Amino acid sequence: MSFSMSTDSSSFPCARQTALDILRERDPQTKATRARPLYDAARDGKAVIEPSLQLSEPADLPGRPERPPLVEPGSLKRRGMQSEAGRAVLLHALAHIEFNAINLALDAVWRFASMPDDFYLDWLKVAAEEAHHFSLLNTRLGEFGHVYGDFPAHDGLWEMAERTCGDVLARMALVPRTLEARGLDASPPIRKRLAQAGDHASAAILDVILEDEIGHVLIGNRWFRHLCDAAGADPHPTYARLAEQYHAPKLRGPFNFEARRDAGFDEAELRALAGLDG
């Protein structure tokens, strides 16, 4: 992907239109490869953001390959991590999450107009980092003799994106602050089991992902509270209302309280989670 170096800003591509173009890309590695240059260009002023631009939704969202087959979550079989086969299934599941996370971040950029410039820069940054995570996992999966698409997966992340497509407040509440925050809780025990199995290379990838995901959830918290403030709404009952309205998954422990605190959850929210954690 090339960007004009002209000083005439009218010749620069539109970052939000380009985000939509990348979202439509079906090849996962091509999608991942294109995400970082777009963020760099927007950050450096070589791609204009155009918050007021109203873009029409195409019919082919999100762009994704024919494989993996998408199935109901309950039909996915769990395998132990002591075997290479089991770890390959895990790495594939994680790669699928990161692929969907690229799509979710790009979707926020093109879909929601009239937000501050920093909103779009934040989610372009998230897309770039999720693309890096996908590439790390996909490369590691290749070391097990597999490619992304070899195992079935579920579509829960994108289904929430579809449910919240008309409400930026709901999107900020229920994707980064709910679905992605679950990753903060799940990552440490998975990392521990990988290390116990002697797979330190895969465990190291989870270290990278956890550190970045704290920042992603923090971005979600930032914009959720920004929107609540703009509407004069109390974030706590607003979140509860949106979680019920959009059928968010129920929160269950154990919770990574340290990571959630770093990701911007306030003490009242953490106390509520502690109650759910028993």
Image (tube, rainbow, N blue to C red):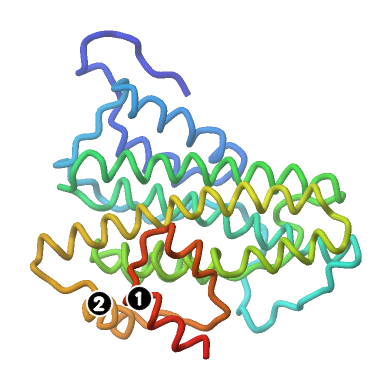
Q: Quadrant of residue 81?
A: bottom right
Tag 1: amino acid: Glu
Q: In the orientation shown, which residue stands out farthest toward the right?
A: 83
In the figure, is residue 69 to the left or right of 128?
right
The residue singled out by tag 1 in the image is: 269
Q: Residue at x 36, y 35 (%)?
A: 18
Q: Quadrant of residue 89?
A: bottom right
In the figure, is residue 271 to the left or right of 135?
left
Report the front residue among 88 and 71. 88
Q: Is residue 108 above or below residue 276?
A: above
Q: Is residue 99 above or below residue 256?
A: above
Q: In the orientation shown, which residue stands out farthest toward the top?
A: 6
Q: In the orientation shown, which residue stands out farthest toward the bottom?
A: 278
Report the front residue among 20 and 84. 84
The residue singled out by tag 2 in the image is: 236
Q: Quadrant of residue 170?
A: bottom left
Q: Residues within 10 Å of mark 1 (few under 14, many from 20)?
A: some
CB contact under 8 Å: marks 2 and 1? yes
In the figure, is residue 183 to the left or right of 60?
right
Count of numbered marks: 2
Report the front residue among 185 and 109. 185
Q: Residue at x 27, y 78 (%)?
A: 242
